[in-house]
Every structure is written in C-alpha cells, then in structure tokens.
Amino acid sequence: MAPQDRLNDQRSGRTGGSTATLEIPVVKGPDDLLRVRDLSVSYGGHQVVTDVSFDLPRGHSLALIGESGSGKSTIARSVLRLLPAGVGRATGTIEVQGQDVLALPERHFRPLRGRTVGFVPQDPSASLNPVRTIGSQAREAAALLPGDLTKADRRRAVVDVLLRVGLDDPERVLASYPHQLSGGMLQRVLIGLAVLPQPALLVADEPTSALDVTIQKRILDLLTDLRDSLDISLLLITHDLAIAAERADSVVVLKDGRVQEAGPTAQVSGAPTSDYARRLHADVPALNPDRYAGLRDVGAARRALSEDEEPKIVVRGVSKTFTVDRKQLTAVDDLSFAVPAGTTHAIVGESGSGKTTTIRLLLGLETPDTGEIIVAGERVDGRSHAQLRAVRRHLQFVYQNPFTSLDPTWKVERLVREPLDRFKIGTKDEQREEVRRAVDAVGLDHTLLGRRPDALSGGQRQRVAIARALVLKPDVIVLDEPTSALDVSVQADIVQVLLTLQADLGLTYVFVSHDLALVRQLAHTVSVVRRGKVVEEGTVAQIFDAPREDYTRVLLDSIPDATHGRREVEPSEKAS
Amino acid sequence: MAQTRSSTTVRKPDARLTRGARRTSSPYLVYALQRVAQAVAVVLLAYCFTFLVISVLPGDPVTNTLRNPENNFTEEEIARIVAYYGLDQPVHVQLWESLSRFLTGDLGVSLRSNLPVSRLIGEIIGSTLVLAVSALVVAVVLAFGIAYGTRNLPAPLARPLRAFPSLFLSVPNFVIGLLLINIFAFQLGLFQVIDSEGPAATFFAAVALGIPVSAQIAEVLIANLDHEARQEYAGFATSRGLSRSRLFWRHLLKPSSLPVVTVVALTVGELLGGALITETIFGRTGVGSLVQRSVTTQDLPVLQAVVVLAAITFVVVNLVVDLVYPLLDPRVDLRGATKRVRPVTEGASA
Amino acid sequence: MTTITTEATEGPQAPGGWKPSALRRGRGSRRVPPLGVVASFAMLLLVVGWSLAPGLFTGQDPARGVPADAFQGPSVAHWFGTDHLGRDEFARVVHGSASSVTSALVAVAIGVLVGGLIGLVAGFIGSWVDVALSRVVDVLLAIPSFLLAVVVVSALGFETINAAIATGVSAVAVFARVMRSEVLRTRRAVFVEASLLLGGSRMHVLLRHVLPNASRSVLNLAVLQFGLSILVIAGLAFLGYGDPPPASDWGLLVSSGKDYPLAPWLVYTPALVTIATVLSANRISRWLRKTD
C-alpha cells in the first residue's frame, strides 16, 4: 500500500474534547502501532498535558507540532517513559503494539526501549557521552540486537548501519570522540544507533533544530527514507509547521497541552479549522511569503525614489582574516554591498559563512584588513571606541538572543533608558517620555517597565531590546537573527513591529539570518554569503524566483515545501 | 572550583575558530612548560611570602628567644646566630640570603634545638604522610560511597544521604576526633590512645581527618553526577534500553569523576592543615605537633620550612594532576577552551 | 579552608538534558524559602542575638562559678550543664558567641574586600596584571589555609582578633578566584558588549554591569565562608591561639571540656551550637546559589 492510500484509512487523533473532526470513526485496528488515549501529564501538581489522544499506524509518520510550552516534548517523553523522576506523573494509556507502556513496571518496559521504541534526541552535540568513543557507545547499542550474534556480526551491523545513514567512513567515525564530529554527522550517528535494533517506532524530538538548513534537509530526507525502507513508524516532534506539512502523513497541533486540531496533513496544513492552527499557519514564513507585502512595499517605494541618493550603508571590498594557531582563517573575503535608506538588506548564510564577523565589522567591533564601511555618511572602520560614539547614535543593534543581551539585574525602564543616559540626552522627564514612546512603539505594556528581564517572556525581552535600540532614534538598526530564539507566533509579532517601524520612521535595516523563508517575507535586497564570500546578490525577487548560483538553489531547496503535501524522496536525493 | 581551575589552566583566545580537536604533541608541550614554570614561580613566591609574614610582622621573636635567659645562649653564640640569620641586615638582604640557602636545599637550623630543620622534619614526616595518605583514601572511598548511594539507593535512603556532605563540612574536625576517641577508644576499646601510632589509632585518626575532606569530594561528585545525568546523552542511552546501574557505571561515572581528580588535588592543603589538629587530639608526633611546638617557642626557621614544604607538596600534586588531566579527559582541548567544536562544513557526510 | 563552588543541583531531573518548560521558569522558589532555610535564618538570628545582647538570653554570670554545683549534667536550671568550677555552660556559650561571631564576620570582611578587589582588578584589567595577581592568589592557595592562619596568628600574637585576621587572610584566595572568574564571565556577557555599543564607557560597564552581576556569587560565597570561618577560628581557639580563658570562645570551650571525659556535655553542647551555626550558614548559601 502506498503511503498516500494508507492515509485514507488512517484514524488520526481526536481533538481536545469531543469535537472530533475526522471522517473516519475511531475503531481499533490491528495496524495501530501507537495508541495514545486521554494522556495527561503533570509536574508536581502543574498540569502540562491534558487529555491528548492520537494513533500512529504502522509505517506512517505523525507530527506533533506546537510552540514552547505546548507539551509536545512531554508527550514524546511519556511515550519513552523518560519523564523527570519523582515529579512527572502521566495518566491515561499509551499503547505500543497493544501493550500499555504506562502500566508496565520498569523492568518490563526496558526491553522495549531501543528494540521497539527508538529515540532520536534534539541536540546531537550533547547526545553522546563526551568521554567515550562513538565505537564503544555503538557496541552498547549493538548489544540490543536480538539473536546469538558474534562480536564480529555485531560490529558488521554497526558499520552497515552507519553506511546506511550516509557516513562514508564508519571506521573513522567509530574511533572518534563526539566532539570531533560535526553536528550533521553526529545526528546521523544518533539516527543510526536508534535504528540499529530495528525498532518499530522512532520518536524524533526536533531532530534538526540544532542544524544548518541544508543539513536539516538531508537529515529529514534520511528519516523519511529510513521510514520507507525499514518500515519504521515515525513520531516527529517539531515546532515547524512547514516541516511537519512536508514530512508527515498526519499532524496533531498542540497548545498548552491540549490538542487543537488533528488530522491528515493535507487537511490541517491546507485548510485548518481551529483558530489556533489557522493562526499558526499564518505565522509560518514558508507558508506565507507575501504576508507583509503591504508594509514592505513602503520601503520598496522609498527605494525607487531614492535611486540616485547616496545609500545609507556602503560596504566596499571588506576583508577580515583571523590568525588561529598560526593558520590564516579568512572570515570575510572581499565583501561589498550597499543599502538604500529606508530598506532592508538581508545577509543570508549558514554557520561559518562569516555573518557574525560581518556584523562585528559593521558595528566597529572589529577592524577590517582592507576595504571601507560607511554608515550614514561616516566611516566606521578604523575608528576608536570614543570616535565611534558619534556614529553609534545612528547605528543600533539588536542581538540574536534576548536572554543574554539584557542585564538581568536591571529593570526594563533603566535598560531602555541606558542609551539616553550614556549620551546624556534630555532631562529626567524628557527621558521618561522617550522611554515610554519607545516602549509603546514596540507594543510593550507600561506595567512591565518595573520588571527585570527574568520576569519577561522571550518575545517581551526582544521587544525591550528593540525599544532600547529605538530610543536614540537611529537611522540604521542591525538585526542579528532577532527572532531565531523565539516561537513562530512571537516571531510574527516581532517582524510586524519591525516592519511597521520601518514604514513609519524610514529605518534602514541590515537583517542577518539563516532563515530564507523569513528573509523573503521582509527584505528588499539579499546577499547570499558562504565561507566569507558573497555568492549571489540581488533583490528578493531575483534571488528567490531566478537564482543564478547552485548554492543559492540548494539553500532555496531547503525551505520546507509544504504545498505538495508529503515529499517523496527521489532516488538521487537519498543520502549518498 | 574545579570549573574555575580548568578555565584558568586551559586558556586560549578565540577558540570558536579552532578547527578539529586532535591533540598534537606541541600544544601539550607548550602547556606543560607553562604549567611547570608557573609552579616554580609559585613555590618561590610562597617562600618569600612566608618569610615576609614571619619577619615583617611586629615583634622580633628571634632576638627575644635568643635573649631569653632560660635559653642559656652565650653572647658569642648569639652573635653567631644573629650573623647566620643576618638579623643585622635589612629585610630584603635577609630574604635574598635565606632564599639562596633554600635553593641549595638548606632549610636552616632550629632556634630551639639547634638541629638542622631538615633533620627535625625528616624524623617525623613519615608519620604525617601515613596519616594524610590514609585520610585521603578514607575520604575518597567515603565520597564515592555517598555519591553512589545518592544515585542507586531507593529515594527514602538517597535523599537524606545528600545532606551528609553538608553535615560533614559543618562539624569542626576536632569534634569528630574527640567523638571517635570517646566512642571507639573509651567506650568500645577498639584502640588505645597511648599507642597513638598503632594501626587502629592511625585508622581512626585518618577517619577524623578524612571526613571533612570527603565532604568536599562528595559534594562535587554528586553535583557532577546530577549534571551528567541531566545531559541529553543520558536520556539517549536510557532510550536505548540501558538499566539504571549500567547507565551509572558505563556513562555517568567517568565524566563525573574525571573533574574530581582536580578537586582531590586541591584537598591536599586541607589534609596538611587539618593534620595539625588531628595529630594534637590523637597525641601523634608529626609535622603538626612540630608546628605546634615551634609556634609556642617561636621557632621561626622550622615554621618557615614547614609552610614551604606544605606549599611544595600542594603545588607538585596539583602540577601532576594538571599535566595528566588533559591526557585523561578527551573533552579538554588544549588549543581552545571550547569542548565541542563544530567544523565549518559538514565534512565527509556532505 | 578550601571551599567548593558548584551548582546546586537538587530538584527534579529527567534522565537526559530535557527539562519541561513548566519547570524551567526559575525564580519562583525565592518567594517561599523552604522550611530548612527558615530554620537556618532563625538559628543565625539567635546566634547574632546572643552576641549582641547575651544578657537577654541568660541570667547567669559566665565567669562566676558555684563550686558545689560543679559537673552537673544538663537540666532545667543549667540547660547545658555546668563545668568543673560550677559555671553555667549555657551562659558561657552565649557570652562566647560574641567573639566567635564577630571574628568570623571580620574574617569574611577581609576576604570579601581584599579578595574581591584582587579578583575584580585581575579579571577586568586582564593582561599582565591578571597574570601577576593570579600568581599571588596561587601562592595563597598553595599554603594550606589552616597552616597559614596559624603562622599569621603566631606572628601577630595569640588573640582572638588576630585569629580572625589570620582566617581572613587565608580566605582571600578563595574570594579572589571566584570574583575573578565571575568578572571574566560577566565581561564576556552579551549585555556588556551591548552596553559598550550603546555608548557606555569601561568604567560605567565595570561599576554598573560587571560588579552587580559578579557580586551575586560573591555574596553567597561570603555566607558560606562565614560558616567556614567559624570552624577555622574555633580550630585556632581549640589549639589555644585565641584569647586565653576565662574567654569562652566555642572552640576554647570544647578544648577545655575535653579534659573531663566524664562530663561529655562540656564538649557536645558548644560543639552542637557550632555545628548548627555552620550548617545554617551552609544551608542559606546553598539556597541563595539555587535561587540565583
């Protein structure tokens, strides 16, 4: 049976209460590998998952999606019985191959681990013991293989599975310690170890969120391929609706521990019926490339008008080389771009592409070896901290991670006021007024002014950081992946704030990101960078609709393509 | 403190850009030479520091001792000793001469017994070493026992066990000593206080000295075990079907106890300082009782020598541990402080 | 004494790096301290009360003994019994706490000020200043702290205040280390770079960002060190390096009590008071570390 046909007689989960929206009545079928019924989980009296039910037939894949705090990982951990000892309490039933996992005593559940239920964790760099070689940990996994196998047999099985997951040199991998491999390779090792005992069900908890986009795609391809070839069912936990839409047969949307909507992927992602799923759908950049078209057009119009004006930012022939262990490492190589006033220029690249160094050069935190950087008519490069003070009034910065960029001992009001204090602008009353105005502009409530960052959510913190950047009324704001640490709905709010500000105040943005779908939503011009070099540059339309370079195409290809339902892996795409 | 230590000893700028982590001999050699040079500097500075504390602080105990009629020094002897110690010279000259003698291995002469300090210390150092080493063994065994219990015993037993290190740290070590003597010597008669160097008495003295030290080791070990157990790899190993005890032995123990090696080395000072009190309580003759006697009689050369020897012991033990540690723990990359380095490209699998 | 600073890691844990977001929100626990912490605060308050106004807690004169009452076990009249001269042991403990507590505070103050300054300067200025100061700290760390305290006190003279100074000197290294590493950590923090980008001067960053953040760990180390200093000072008093009798430092009380094995309460009562005080300080320090 082809997966698509299967989809039809599959009974997926029911929604929260009794509002089941599925066409197929719930009947217990022999095909059900995993049946979850009325699962509720609480931590020390605090309920985080409420009455969740769903089924996963053999050979299918099901995605649990939700934002942080939705309980999706808790459900995955419940299936694996990896809840925090002592505080985590799960009720309801979780049946794996007809056995109720929650009712089993530990010693009867343990044989199921690995052999029946495999697990692929989230962060590959932390998921292997750092002081033991991968070989010794693989031997441990091989011990789970059934039957009377010799040492050599088990070793061969390990080598085979590593080859199977696309690691070309298994011997080298086995002799390595985890820190000697890259994230993508480690994730392949983890998947290999998980499928080695040939489990019937594989639980993958955000298996790609710690990886670069192009590697992300390869890992997802691998999982899809293994599911098909080894007949493994996949329970995929993700925050990314686009990934779920692309990879899963059916989807369960969660919020605050309750099922919001469940059903076949095409239905949930194509025509969501619940409010939450609809909103989530609208917030995912990959699914809504033109969401902010109206706001963006303001900038585009400005760009057309200012064609002959001097660009706000000019970067010309900039290179920067670091010396590490007597080796030269070129972080940025002959980089040039220009940003017209009032527009957004995106710098897109994966890790190691020189994005971070570019930002630091732009802000005057590093000095380029060659080339020049001009912001609002003033040179940035080659100037001292004191000389840069004048430039910095026009040039502000928002960090990637709002959890580290705000001093935890300061209150919001003081944080936002800091730039005014430093530049000695205005009287106390005027400052208070400015702070209130900046806070209003980013849509923060005034009651939060007396709080410390610890008492704020991630989105609120990032708004504080933007307000702090705004309070000096700068012309240019450099944004370093300002939403990558945030949930997708929060990201949508922040992007809305940024674009509204740009339309109202004519701000110029340099927006650094690895997320092409997001860039497409908000930028006017794009530079694609790789290993410190600009691979391709142009307007958003040029880059996204008619890419000229292979690398750009690879990047674009890694945007999850949700429009066609589940992706079938073509033979050529399979891991080599 | 283990954390602070590794961050100060394995320090290199901008580790983010370091590629790979294979250890070659040359960064290790550089590191080793740096560490050895540091150690030598610390010992020399420790000598100067002690000398200055003893001689600059108010009072001139040497002359006082010499002039004390009870000590029966003749004027001639006094002149000889004053000249020997250079007491008529300014302090920096005295320091220089004292330091030069130290570098040739001459620890000076006791003011009280007129014997070479090296001989005085040589006679009794064995007893203190036996005590300190046994105490260390007791401490390590006890600490690992407690840590094992907190992870592998059922919760009603494991929970109170977690309070033990804190309790051990709060009891003055002289109280532990007195308690042990009271129970095991006076009540149970397991050892005689008079036979203070016998094996039974030594054992209990080692327990008294080792208990506070074990608390420090156990605290770090428990914290490390908890930390490692929270790492994703422990969950991944559990998901592959490992039992609790196999997880402990095969996965958690090694990464948790490796950093403990440096903590054990740091407790050397504690052992030597604590020996002062333990030896007094158990009536043992050792370096501790020698220090006590020298303090009462203001026998400065002996004090100076003991302090410097203690510092040397501490420095050498810690030097050895720091030199061996990078070879034991694959996480330590001497070319950069970061433990997990992600190469710029995905590499072979791409 | 060597202190060990590790993360307090009690509490719920899953096997694996994952922690449910419901448990991830910190801070909440600071509002309602656990019972043990409340009891610890009560114990320390009691001891401070003893040292400020001993007369309020005991009507007996610690120096005047009734020979007829010698060696009485603990009773309602004499909570902690009486000693060989018939003096009330409870009164002696209460009156002795002033000097034990004050000297521990003096020791901590020296450690915090001198060590904190060394650590701050070394961590913030860096380069050769850091190298030089780090070696000085290494020296202080290399000399066993109790031995160092003995040498310093014997150079200064056998008095309790000198014992306190000596204890403080031996604690300098620990404070310097913690302060230095905290400063280094904070200095690399993103929000510090942010402040520089917003136009802050180095001095501004040091005083307004680095110091407040670094002092958090130093505060809880100070509480911990208060307990440890009580132990060190008791040890020095036990060896007779503090004020001589009739002073009644806790260590001295244990020391004189040990000569009368038939009156064990003379050892156990001051010892228990010491243990309870130190344990309380440890508990509070642990709690501070956890809620930070």
Image (cartoon, coloured by chain):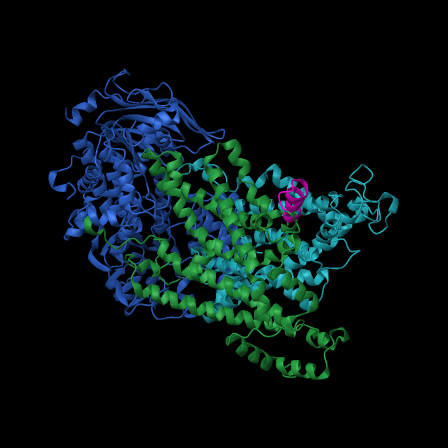
Left/right placement of residue B244 relative to residue C3 reads: left
Is C118 in the magenta? no
Q: Main secondary structure of the magenta part?
A: helix
Q: Nearer the viewer, residue A533 or B210?
A: B210
Residue A85 seen from this side: yes
Chain (cyan)? C
* Residue A576 on image: x %, y %: 14, 44
Q: Residue furthest left?
A: A572
Q: Residue at x 80, y 55 (%)?
A: C246
> Residue B33: x percent and y percent?
39, 68
Counting labels gives 0
At 44% from the left edge and 43% from the top edge, which residue is drawn?
A: B225
Is A269 located above or below residue B87 in the figure? above
Chain A colour as displayed: blue
Say whether residue A35 is left or right of residue C283.
left
**Whole-percent x, y for residue A283 in the image:** 32, 38
The residue range painted magenta reads: B176-191
For the N terminus of chain C, the image quarter is bottom right
| Residue A563 appears in the picture as rendered | no
Viewer-closest of C150 and C119: C150
Q: Position of residue A364 (x, y in %)?
A: 36, 65
Q: Nearer the viewer, residue A210 or A180?
A: A180
Residue B166 versus residue A238 in the image, above or below: below
Q: Residue at x 38, y 38 (%)?
A: B247
Q: Quadrant of residue A391?
A: bottom left
Specify whether residue B182 is painted magenta.
yes
In screen coordinates, is A502 left or right of B196? left
Tell me the shade of chain B.
Answer: green
